[in-house]
Image: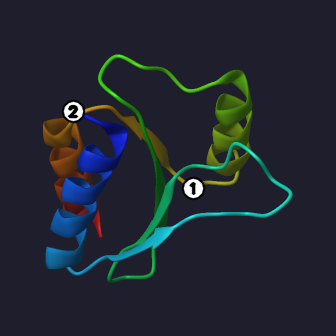
Amino acid sequence: MLEKQIEKKVCDFAKVKGLLCYKFVSPGNAGVPDRMFVLPNGGVFFIEFKQLGKKPTPLQEREALKLTSRGCPVFVIDNVTEGLVTIQRMVDQC
């Protein structure tokens, strides 16, 4: 399955669960995660989407570390099931 197909299915599920789902683009900051999600309680987390078995680039890993070191969770998702479980887990925690 293509990365964009995984991303769409996970984002559609997130919206049904009441999350805001933004395509995250930060000019001048390459390597940021693909999506930013805002939970109903205001919590924020990020997802980097990949095709099955693909890994983040070193630049993407560095950007994820910047976010996680400041308390923002970052997930790497390479399949729909893992994405849906991640969204549900984050909703359940808020």
Q: Measured from the top left, where is residue 3 in percent x and y?
A: 35, 39
Residue 50, quarter of picture: top left
- The C terminus - image quarter: bottom left
Q: Measured from the top left, where is residue 43 in percent x and y?
A: 45, 72
On screen, residue 22 above or below 8: below
- Could you tell me the amino acid type at mark 1? Cys
Total marks shown come to: 2
Q: Which residue is mark 2?
A: 1
Q: Mark 1 or mark 2, which is nearer the start of the sequence?
A: 2
- Nearest the viewer among 62 and 55 is 55
Mark 2 secondary-structure assignment:
loop
- The N terminus - image quarter: top left
- Could you tell me the amino acid type at mark 2? Met
Q: Measured from the top left, where is residue 12 in percent x and y?
A: 20, 67
On screen, residue 93 above or below 82: below
On screen, residue 55 above or below 91: above
Q: Which residue shows up at 66% across the image and 35% down it?
A: 60
Q: Which mark is residue 72?
A: 1
In the shown orientation, is residue 41 left or right of residue 90? right
In the shown orientation, is residue 31 left or right of residue 80? right
Q: Given contact means CB atoms under 8 Å apart, are the residues at marks 2 and 1 in contact? A: no
- Nearest the viewer among 44 and 83 is 83
Q: Which residue shows up at 22% across the image and 81% down it?
A: 18
In the shown orientation, is residue 13 left or right of residue 60? left
Q: Residues within 10 Å of mark 1 (few under 14, many from 20)?
A: some
Q: Which residue shows up at 74% across the image and 31% down it?
A: 59
Mark 1 secondary-structure assignment:
loop
Residue lying at the far right of the rendered structure: 28
Q: Which residue shows up at 23% across the image and 76% down it?
A: 15
Q: Measured from the top left, where is residue 65 in percent x and y?
A: 68, 37
- Nearest the viewer among 1 and 42 is 1
